[in-house]
Image: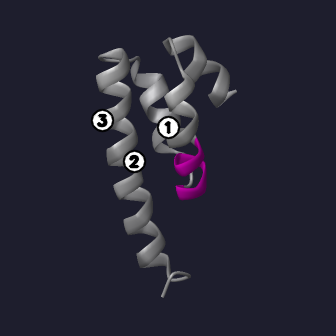
Amino acid sequence: MKESVIYQDIVQKEALKVINRQLKRRFGDIDASLVEQVRNLSAEQLEELGEDLLDFYEVADLVAWLE
């Protein structure tokens, strides 16, 4: 089940929702290009970003993480 494409798609979409809410709460509206980069991350990358986001102080931290 966890290996199915549909399951992975659902996990990725839900993780993306959480990350987008966290980013908006921490930084307000961010540049559309950053939103697009985050949208293209895998579920595993989104999970990692969710943890690392707790240590971000400014949008530049997100930019550096995405590079």
Residue 1: image location, x then y, percent: 48, 88
Disc 1 to disc 2: CB gap under 8 Å: yes
What amino acid type should be assigned to the residue bearing mark 1? Answer: Val
Ranked by sequence position, the earlier of labels 2 and 3 is: 2
**How busy is the neighbourhood of tag 1: few (under 14 within 10 Å), some, or many (20 plus)?**
some
Q: Residue at x 41, y 53 (%)?
A: 15
Tell me, for residue 38, which label it has, or none. 1
Relative side of 34 to 22, left or right: right
Q: Is residue 3 above or below residue 45?
A: below
Q: Which residue is mark 2?
A: 16
Q: Secondary structure at mark 1?
A: helix
Whole-number angstrom distance, CA of label 2 to CA of label 3: 9 Å
Name the residue beneath numbered marker 3: 21
Q: Which residue is located at x 53 percent, y 34 percent? A: 37
Magenta residues span 43-48
Q: Residue furthest front?
A: 55
Side (left or right) of 46 relative to 67: left
